Image (spheres, grey):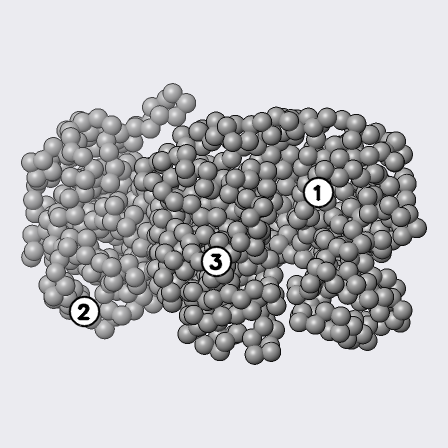
Amino acid sequence: MLKNYFKIAFRNIFMHKAYAAINIVGLAIGMAACLLILQYVNHELSYDQFHVQKDRIYRVTQDRYDNGVLSTQWAAGAYAVGNSFKDAFPEIADYVKMTQAGSVVVKENNNLFKIEQTYFATPSFFTVFSYPLLHGDAATALKEPYHSVISATMAKKIFGTDQVLGKTMLVNNDKLYTISGVMADMPENTHFSTEMLFSYSSFLDLVGPNNTPETAWSWDGCLTYLLLKKGTDPVKLEKKFPALVQAKSGEELKRFNAGVTYHLQPLTDIHLYSNRMMEARANGDGKTTYLMLGIALFIVVIAWINYINLATAKAISRAKEVGIRKVIGSQRKQLIGQFLFESGLLNAMAIILAALIIAVSIPSFNRITGHHLDFSILQKPAFWGSLLLLFLAGTFLSGIYPALVLSGFKPITVLKGKLVNTTQGIILRKSLVVFQFAASLFLLIGTLTVSKQVSYMKKQELGMQVDQVLVIKPPIVARDSTFMNQMTAFKQSLVSQPGISAITASSSIPGEPVMWNAGGIRLLSQDDKAAKQYRVIAIDYDYVPLYGLKLIAGRNFSKEFGTDRKAVIFNQSGIQQLGFQKPAEAIGKQIFFWGDTLSIAGVVSNFHQQSLRDAFEPLILRSAPDVRGYFSVKVAAGNIEPAIKTIQQSWNSFFPGNTFEYFFLDEHFNEQYKADQRFGTVFGIFTWLAIFVACLGLFGLASFTTLQRTKEIGIRKVLGASVVSILNLLYKEFVVLIGIAFLLAVPIGWYANHLWLQGYAFRINLSPLLFLMPLVLILIVAFLTVSLQTIRAALANPITSLRTE
Amino acid sequence: MIKLEHISKWVTTAGLRTFLLKDINLTINEGEFLSIMGPSGSGKSTLLNVIGMLDDANEGEYNFLGQPIHTLKEKQRSQLYKQYIGFVFQAYHLIDELTVYENIETPLLYQDTKSAERKAMVADILDRFNIVGKKDLFPSQLSGGQQQLVGIARALISSPKLILADEPTGNLNSKQGEEIMDLFRKLNEEDGVTIIQVTHSEKNAGYGNRIIHLLDGRIEQPR
């Protein structure tokens, strides 16, 4: 019996090649797109899933309030949290504390190795998380002070082998660390990435006996992870936090009229749903991930609809066969089986083609998405699982309706040739076409909005100049006592050079979050209750002019004012938070800053420290001529190569033992838009694929309806209708369908855009053009698609079409 | 074999009943060769379809081999006619995508006949109808008469007790028509197959051993 179905199906495919091609190509594109996106989505969803105890690990997040208003949200919180919580709550089995050790320089055999993003971590790091340790004891590797665990790759890089247990290394030309463990390289899909860990006890020793992080409730910057005992309800545990916080730091908080709350964030939620201060690395975006999943489904559903539409439109040509089969003894369920088998066959062919498309397009997909898919996905059960699922779902969802329609024909009706298209079927087909176009329009509206928003952000005035600025990463190896002299000499040596117009040092540079957050700041005249939090950048005299910040009141720091170490410049948001409406009012006012009294020397207008995704933050530029941070060098256009050489020579002589690393600030700044741009590109490509598939279906459908109306067209022409009026007749139908689709797509598109744009502090307005342009585009595309069929029909000689009757 | 009592069938348009069949009483015994005649629209095909269980009557009782058909479910009826009835159509109604061999074989597939047995049966009937040489051709490659031969071969493959033929020679020239009618007579006489045919032609009707005339849905003169 299967053999018989197989023959029928194959002969049908061969006889109606165009029809089969439309279906197979459409399904294949839909499946390939869907599978590719699924791989990407799968990767995004896989973050931190490999930790054996992942269901019991939570990160403690911290929210700080000023005067009852949420002020800052932290991934890393106070240092006392981990140990205090563990002591107070028996539900907690263990905790991990980590704090940044920043970039370090290791010297080995007179070679310098710079390692970025290193951490101090408690010994529990390797027992709570499931990062495998290749050499060393997981329980004790990070126990002793000045012990370190490094990654296998880093070990090979520095020492040429990973057999390095017990070796010592000189870090930052300062402390000697013993290597007590070698860990496997961290996988890509974890929210956290480092190649070198130092024991937390080293940190305690380094900060000295006068500083006591273990009891510090207002010293932030410690990542805290809790391992809960089995069966612990995190929600209930979280409710116990406020009482403890009140007991430990209630007095201090009250004095500043401040508040702090702690929350438990599941480990596996961090990558997709967390965007807080001091994240261990830039996280993904759950919204984007699920949006991508939505697009994937849209494309494949559009392809399935093509199948349904074409199969039911073509039903008439299969009706006779159904009638005969019924008369010679087929039951309805056998016919349903036959037609499902056919849809399965087409889907199977489409899957094969989809696999080819995937194989061919993996490199481009990686290039566009910045993703690392390779052919190893073919070895993953998840890939084959989704493939099988897609095949079964496609076969069934697209096959069942046509199968029911076809198998439902009454033999006497079809064998007498009395079958007419039921209005029910026509309405269904039209609704499905409306859905396809509504989906296409929706995607097009979305992709247009994304690209407009990205170009808006890139074109907007930043309020500062980031062009022609070369940034050098901070020197790590340098003695505090001599640093000021080294730095001054370094700057002096460069200012006189040709091609270099200015140089400045600062603790932060534009294009990234300001790492220094200071709370408890208020006007001297106010009491502690009025204190608020501010972002702080330490800068020297040249920062404001080099970056072209606009002073709207007061003056820049200057060596002519002897007391300028005690001066600060606010931005407009900062002044407003301080309580001034007019910038000029703030000039000369004194503020209380961590025990110091500083006076406001100037106010600059707000500038975009970060991308336009982020709002202006209250900012203090603090005078610090000896700041140890980034150097920004303004270079003249066209003279960059020699300038870099000059800078490097100076660097090597003034900061020996430090690697020279630089980048261009405008590129660095635009890196912030990379994810958005990438998303826009991917979105755009898959949108056009969806539209292409939808048009394949429209083409098929147009050819059927045109064929059905051949006789009508013939009669109309005989009666004197012009070609134009015939075309009008044929187009009207599709224009009406697209019109309805548009009415559906606009509110949904508007709402989705509105939601998406909420993520941006500075955003475009949702102008009608964003909706009308897609409509026009779709109309043109649909018009061209339909025209391939209709023009031929309208131009045909009526004699031919009528003679066949 | 077949017993129709007070069979009526109608369609209702704008509240008015138009009778397609009205109070038909008819008994057909095994081994008969019955011809149904009458002008266009007199209800011949409708009657044949009711007998063939492709269509329902609105009223009346229908007994087939002692089974009350009017009380049976779709599935049971389908079982019955699969086993006992073969159809032959004016327009042959072969499946265009299947070869002669496959067309004839298809009813056996629906009866779950074993492969070896199927082959033997199809080979046998191809031989009997002298169309072995054409078994791999598609219907469009055959003449009308040849197609109808295939149609009859397909109707006979599952050895039905009853053959229903709706103007089997309507699309054929007279020579081809005669051959088909001779075949029917032979089947009736030698194999004892009961045959009911609808025809316009007095000559064809003469091949049978009983004729009924329909007019406006009634049997005019049962003989």
Of marks 1 and 3, which one's residue comes earlier in the chain?
Answer: 3
Q: Is residue A496 left or right of residue A393?
A: right
Q: Residues within 10 Å of mark 1 (few under 14, many from 20)?
A: some
Q: Estimate the x, y position of residue A549 in percent, counting from the top left.
A: 84, 49
- Pick the quarter of the image with the C terminus of chain B: top left
Pair 1/3: label in front: 3
**Depth check: A229 or A563 in front?**
A563
**Callout 3: residue from which chain?**
A
Q: Which residue is mark 2?
A: B130
Q: Secondary structure at mark 2?
A: loop
Q: Estimate the x, y position of residue A718 in percent, counting from the top left.
A: 62, 48
Amino acid type at circle 2 is: Asn
Pair 3/2: label in front: 3
**Callout 1: residue from which chain?**
A
Real-space Cα distance between discs 3 and 2? 101 Å
Q: Disc number at residue A145?
A: 3
Q: Are marks 3 and 2 in contact (CB under 8 Å)?
A: no
Q: Are marks 2 and 1 in contact (CB under 8 Å)?
A: no
